[in-house]
Amino acid sequence: MESKWGKVIIHASAFIAPVLVPILFFLLSSEEEIKRLSIQALLFQVVMWLLIGISSFFSVVLIGIPFLIVFVIMTIVVPIIGIVKALSNEKWNYPIVGRWV
């Protein structure tokens, strides 16, 4: 599979199967860039779920509502940015976790 479409599928998986697809690409791909991106996508989803969970907990006392809104928007917008960058063949790392991998 061409690297460009692999990247698009990994980014788009955030809306369909955010855990399964990155793991499959990591295990089945031989390209280092695809492996790195699949780990980033998986870590990004885990971190965002954690942040949304913490924000939901703090929403009880109204402190977490602004954070909850920001993190939900990030969970939707960031993969879309990744898809656009992958279609234009630009190198792109996920925010927050991009430097971890």
Image (spheres, rainbow, N blue to C red):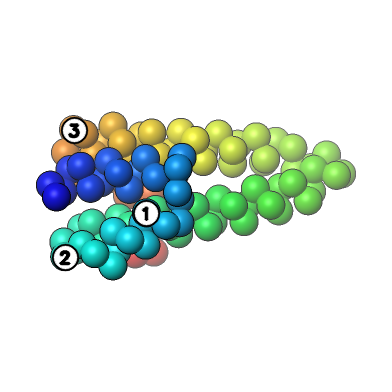
Query: Would you call the spot at circle 2 few (<14 residues within 10 Å), some (14-19), or many (20 or more)?
Result: few
Q: Amino acid at mark 1?
A: Val
Look at the numbered discs 2 and 3 and tell me whether their residues touch, using CB distance below 8 Å: no
Q: Quadrant of residue 100?
A: bottom left
Q: Which residue is mark 1?
A: 21
Residue 95 appears anywhere in the view: no
Choose between 20 and 32: the one closer to the eye: 20
- Residue at position x 26%, y 36% in the image: 85
Q: Amino acid at mark 2?
A: Ser
In the drawing, does residue 53 fall left or right of residue 5? right
Q: Which residue is mark 2?
A: 30
In the drawing, does residue 70 fall left or right of residue 93? right
- Residue at position x 38%, y 33% in the image: 80
Which numbered disc, 1 or 3, marks the residue closer to the eye? Answer: 1
Which numbered disc, 2 or 3, marks the residue closer to the eye? Answer: 2
Looking at the image, is mark 2 or mark 3 earlier in the sequence? 2
Q: Does dot 1 land on a helix, a strand or a loop?
A: helix
- Residue at position x 45%, y 42% in the image: 16
In the drawing, does residue 93 fall left or right of residue 32? right
Look at the numbered discs 1 and 3 and tell me whether their residues touch, using CB distance below 8 Å: no
Looking at the image, is mark 1 or mark 2 earlier in the sequence? 1
Q: Position of residue 56 (x, y in %)?
A: 74, 46
Q: Which mark is residue 47?
A: none
Cα distance between the residues tagged 1 and 2: 15 Å
Q: Position of residue 15 (x, y in %)?
A: 46, 40
Q: Position of residue 24 (x, y in %)?
A: 33, 61
Q: Which residue is mark 3?
A: 88
Query: Would you call the spot at circle 3 few (<14 residues within 10 Å), some (14-19), or many (20 or more)?
Result: few
Cα distance between the residues tagged 2 and 3: 22 Å
Q: Quadrant of residue 97?
A: bottom left
Residue 86 appears anywhere in the view: yes
Q: Does dot 2 land on a helix, a strand or a loop?
A: loop
